Image: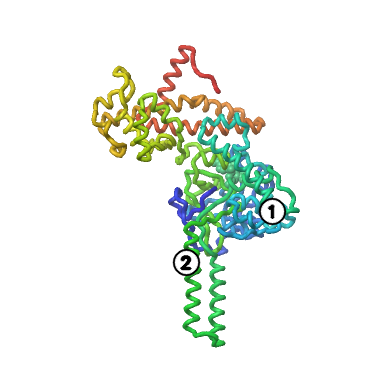
Amino acid sequence: MLILSSSAHNVNKTLTVPLKCSLSSTYYKTFSCACASNSRFGDVNVEPLLEWAKTSGIKGLNVRPAMFADGLRGMKAVADIKAGDLILSVPRQSAVYISPRQRCPFPDFIKPEYWTIAPWFIKLALMILHQKRQTDAPLAGYIEELPEHVELPFLWDDDVLQSLQYPHLIHQIKEQRAEWVRIHEAVTQRGLQPGQDAITQQELYWAMSCVRSRTFSGPYVGSTLRARINLALIVAALVLTNATLGLADLQQTLTAAAAVFIFNILYELILSRSAKQYAMCPLIDLINHSSTVESEVSYDYVSDSFIVTASKDYKIGDQIFVDYGQNNDGLMQYYGFSESNNAKDVYMMSNLLKWLEEVLHTSQKGLDALNDEGLLSALQTVTVERSGFSSETLQAIRFLIATSPSPDPSSTSVASTASSSNPAASSQRPSSFSAPGDAALESRLAAVLVHACNRELGSLGTSIQEDTAYLEAGSKRRGSAASSSVAADRIAVAFRLEKKRVLISCLKNLGVDYEALTSESRKSDRKAGTGRGFA
Ligand SMILES: C[S@@+](CC[C@H](N)C(=O)[O-])C[C@H]1O[C@@H](n2cnc3c(N)ncnc32)[C@H](O)[C@@H]1O
């Protein structure tokens, strides 16, 4: 799910929805004016979509759908664009949209009691399917342009899934598979009204995949400006009628009117603090992701529209991007791709305890002490960032190093001198290790972390060089018709390469040039005639 943002300077937060003033209509050009060039969009004709967009009040300025490298659809600038320029505006009623507590919009299609309990992405998927089933659906022009297939990893064969080499995501994707089977059963058995055509698993999966890869979400801002004005007019009319007919004391009437207003505003304020709105916006959802730009999709309260403003200058022909606000796990699972050098990417290391035990001789007593202080989980579910490990993980490892017994005085394990150099450490609690210790302890900590990263990298089945070579060989073959399983393979290899890069950056921050080291060892492997094949 993509994040609706308001600030051009802050993409990491789930942002508040702005009350931006909409620009005057003369500022906009509609798509038909924006560019007279190529009306073909790869092998798809975009003209019907743009015609529909125009009649639906969607406005675009100096942008147009286009095909980019690797046959990827996206949006390009058809004139120079300045940072801060409005480039797209989609009225809320032209989007597939749900707000909190929205009533079932089609009780003859889906049972209202199921609608109430359905999560947001099922609701949006059902809205798409409902539109698809109608002959004169208002959003037909949009629905027809949704991709026919959305190739997400939950559809991959198990062997391709395993080639992600990343148990954390493989587990989540398997859970998603099971969840989506249950959702299909629930929709068909408890959601669909009797007499309606069955919803096949393929249909529902397609709709849910579109939703998961194209929805923007943001905080709910309460009623639209128009709804608030309508409420004000109704209350004013009641006050006037009362006053004219002398039905009640004027002061009492005004107090009651003020109470209605305050209640309404407070109610919406409370609702907007926890609730979210979700929207699939035609044309906006043709914009591809890059984490190098700042997020620009926001909800404009005054015009009741979703808008995109450029967060940087674009030259004519440039591709327009937004930041989907996801690390590579999220991008892979719900968007079907990973991004090279994604700054938000992390590596979830599930084997840390195993690697620690190789060098630390951890005792049950030590692990229990960590558990008592809520720190054991920092060794079990470990998020490794490019910059390093979390402060909790460092604290827990410091404690283990300082308190590990040394079973073998001749051992080369990094903890072998820890307890002997600091006999008081064994009586210390984990809470004493939140801050960096002396130079000896910190250097042992670094050695343990380097060991863990090296062991993790070594356990992955392929090296970074093998993954790179596989992708490069595939790029040379580009142009030959690649089957979808080959495409999935490449997507999986690109993903696991990025995960290795996270660990390598982490090692770099620990002072280890992993690539230089492995290239040395490859040279000696070659001399010795050894080395690994591609798995
Ligand atoms: C919101 S849509 C963007 C428009 C999409 N390209 C289309 O043709 O409809 C999101 C999908 O676009 C593709 N996509 C977006 N950004 C990408 C990127 N940086 N690299 C590769 N694919 C990307 C993925 O397939 C993703 O599921």
Name, please, the residue furthest toward the top: 528
Residue at screen point 34% across, 27% down: 447
Judge left or right: residue 414 versus residue 210.
left
Where's residue 19, x and y in %? 48, 62
Identify the coloring.
rainbow
Residue 382 placement, left or right of 61: left
Residue at image coords 47%, 66%: 266
Q: Which mark is residue 130?
A: 1
Q: Amino acid at mark 2?
A: Leu
Secondary element type, mark 2: helix
Query: Which residue is identified by label 2?
Result: 266
Q: Quadrant of residue 333?
A: top right
Residues at marks 2 and 1, CA–CA distance in whole angstroms: 34 Å
Could you say where residue 21 lies in the image, as x and y percent from the top left?
50, 63
Which is more foreground, mark 2 or mark 1?
2
Q: Is residue 22 above or below residue 189?
A: below
Residue 362: tell me if it is visible.
yes
Hey, what amino acid is under mark 1? His
**Considering the image in quadrants, where does the C terminus appear?**
top right
Q: Is residue 136 above or below residue 436?
A: below
Graded by Cα atoms within 10 Å as few (under 14), some (14 to 19) or many (20 or more), the crowding at tag 2 reads: few
Rendering quadrant holding ligand 1 = top right
* Position in image of residue 448 (x %, y %): 36, 28
Query: Can you see residue 74?
Result: no
Horizontal side of residue 7 vs 426, given as left or right: right
**Crowd band around label 1 with a 10 angstrom C-alpha radius: few (<14), some (14–19), many (20+):** some
Label 2 with label 1: CB-CB less than 8 Å: no
